[in-house]
Image (cartoon, rainbow, N blue to C red):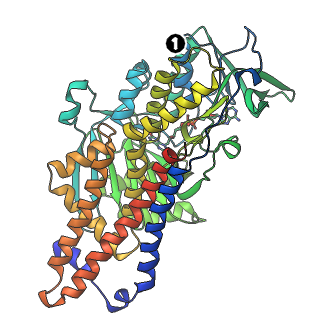
Amino acid sequence: MISSFIKGGEWTFSQYSQLSLSTISVYAVGITLIFFTTALLMMFRPKKVRVNKSNGRVFSKDDPEIIIIGSGVAGSAMATVFARDGRKVTVIERDLKEPDRIVGELLQPGGLNALIKLGLGDCVKEIDAHKISGYVLHSLDSKSEVVIPYSVCEESLGQKLNADGAAFHHGRFIMALREQAMKEPNVTYVEGTATKLIEENGIVTGVQYKLKNEEESKEVYAPLTFVVDGCFSKFRKELVKESVKVTSHFVGLLMHHCPQKKSNHAEIVLMTPSPVLVYQISSDCTRVLVDIKGVLPKNMKEYLLDNVCPQLPEHIQEPFKDGVINGRIRSMPNSYLPPSPIERPGVLVLGDAYNMRHPLTGGGMSVCLNDVFIWRDLLKTIPDLTDYESIIKSLRVFHLRRKNTHSFVVNVLANALYELFSADNTYLVSMKRACLEYFKLGGECVAGPVSLLSVLNPKPHILVGHFFAVALYAVYYVFLSEPFWAIHRVLYRSFMIFFTACTILFPLIWAETKTLLFT
Ligand SMILES: Cc1cc2nc3c(=O)[nH]c(=O)nc-3n(C[C@H](O)[C@H](O)[C@H](O)COP(=O)(O)OP(=O)(O)OC[C@H]3O[C@@H](n4cnc5c(N)ncnc54)[C@H](O)[C@@H]3O)c2cc1C
């Protein structure tokens, strides 16, 4: 195994010449410039948004206090908890039928804990959800696998955290969340499509919408509107500065009666060119998500049967073939949208409309639910929601709190791990192999990374530490792979591995932290 690792990382003169001195200098100058610009921006930060309360509209007693656009994961959870806190809420959802999608089916333990803290734990109880206790990571290169069980770290033991996650049919979960919201007497549901944010004197005061199957536009007014209309958000463009980048696609299908390598464990198959995810979502259904970079193949069935199936572990191959031939194949874009500051009085954006990461680590719903938890806490201290200054102040607290408690780690981990697992250059391939070997070391080398993946202990410094530890481990293998006299090659390859690690991690860290500098 080690020899194959060494062969894979073989060094050639042409690679040596790939790095010109100018490239290094450009990066060095770039990093220095970023530091100086950041310092300058901190010194000359723009004046904060000032809102004169008297500018705003006078709301009537019949108006809701909060309008929520979209009743998916975030919107439905939000409607229930705000209503339970005594707010009058109107939810506008374009389709109240059970959604049938290939997204949001694995809830990490950190997301499940947030759901329980929001008082919505029952939503996963009667939907034939499947308990998830960890992952099995399959490597095709070394024909080996590593079991990565979830565990609650010592630091979190006192908090009585639940250490398991749950997988389910997305539609059933959404319907359970909506049912909870509809039970609340001060929640009004409107089945219709939000078409426009109504703005008066620079403040968003309401929403224009069309009822389902009707052409006439209607209006509803409230001091605060939450835009949570998901990954294809209509309103994002006018509210969020960052733009969405599609990294790849997940092609999804269902397998029936598929055996598991280890019961209650999701599986990640590290295949070429990019990974495949497999997890059971009910007593007889297992979801498989195949990552495809670039343009989707024209004949998808043929691609899945000829290119993907032979690379899958044996126990999955037959159910996979059956799923491809007899089932429905669907695809979804895997998007990246870093968080950005939004300071528009009267409106807040949350969920996928605000922030997205690669779904490889199944972290999206955990981010949504933890964000809802923070906003619930913050809004409790603002009785009058026309107090826009207080809401904008809370928004800054929100950015900081979410970064420290979950979003930084979920976002950076998902994208960094995806880069690693879909490695397409020598140095990344070395890191990918080292990553698997690192997990095989066990102990903290598994417990640390899994505490991030599960969102049970999502501390930024743990993420950065383990990422560079993997890079260091890759360097260790470089030392093993080269003869003593080839020290120049060892140094070059080691440098390139660290350099590649930095080019992955630093832009992601910057994308997460700049929100704090500009708010
Ligand atoms: C392929 C894929 C797989 C994923 N797998 C996982 C996973 O396993 N685990 C995980 O945690 N996350 C996963 N995610 C991410 C997760 O699905 C999202 O983070 C989560 O669903 C976001 O919730 P949301 O409430 O923001 O949006 P959504 O749940 O998408 O809800 C948006 C709602 O808004 C409604 N809406 C949209 N426009 C309007 C309008 N104009 N008017 C009224 N209503 C409107 C929609 O009908 C919908 O009900 C995955 C994502 C992808 C792409």
| Left or right placement of residue 181 versus residue 455 in this view | right
Please tell me whether residue 29 is drawn above or below residue 410 in the rendered image: below
Q: Secondary structure at mark 1?
A: loop
For label 1, the crowd category at 10 Å Cα-Cα, with few meaning under 14, some 14 to 19 and many 20 or more, is few
Picture residue at 37% right of the left edge, 46% below the top: 409
Ligand 1, image quadrant it occupies: top right
* Figure quadrant of residue 15: bottom left
| Left or right placement of residue 99 versus residue 138 in this view | right
Depth order, front residue of 444/270 = 444
- Residue 123 in the image: state x and y as whole percent: 44, 22
| Left or right placement of residue 290 versus residue 109 in this view | right
Please tell me whether residue 211 is drawn above or below residue 422 in the rendered image: above
Please state, as top left, top right, bottom left or bottom right, where the C terminus lies in the image.
Answer: top right
Depth order, front residue of 510/124 = 510
Depth order, front residue of 127/292 = 292
- Residue 477 in the image: state x and y as whole percent: 19, 73
Viewer can see residue 250: yes
Please state, as top left, top right, bottom left or bottom right, where the N terminus lies in the image.
Answer: bottom left
The residue tagged 1 is 85
* Amino acid, disc 1: Asp
Viewer can see residue 105: no
Picture residue at 21% right of the left edge, 76% below the top: 478
- Farthest-out residue, right: 216
| Left or right placement of residue 284 versus residue 214 in this view | left
- Residue 45 in the image: state x and y as whole percent: 56, 47
- Residue 375 in the image: state x and y as whole percent: 50, 26
Please tell me whether residue 119 is drawn above or below residue 365 in the rendered image: above
Picture residue at 57% right of the left edge, 41% below the top: 354
Picture residue at 37% right of the left edge, 41% below the top: 257
* Figure quadrant of residue 432: bottom left
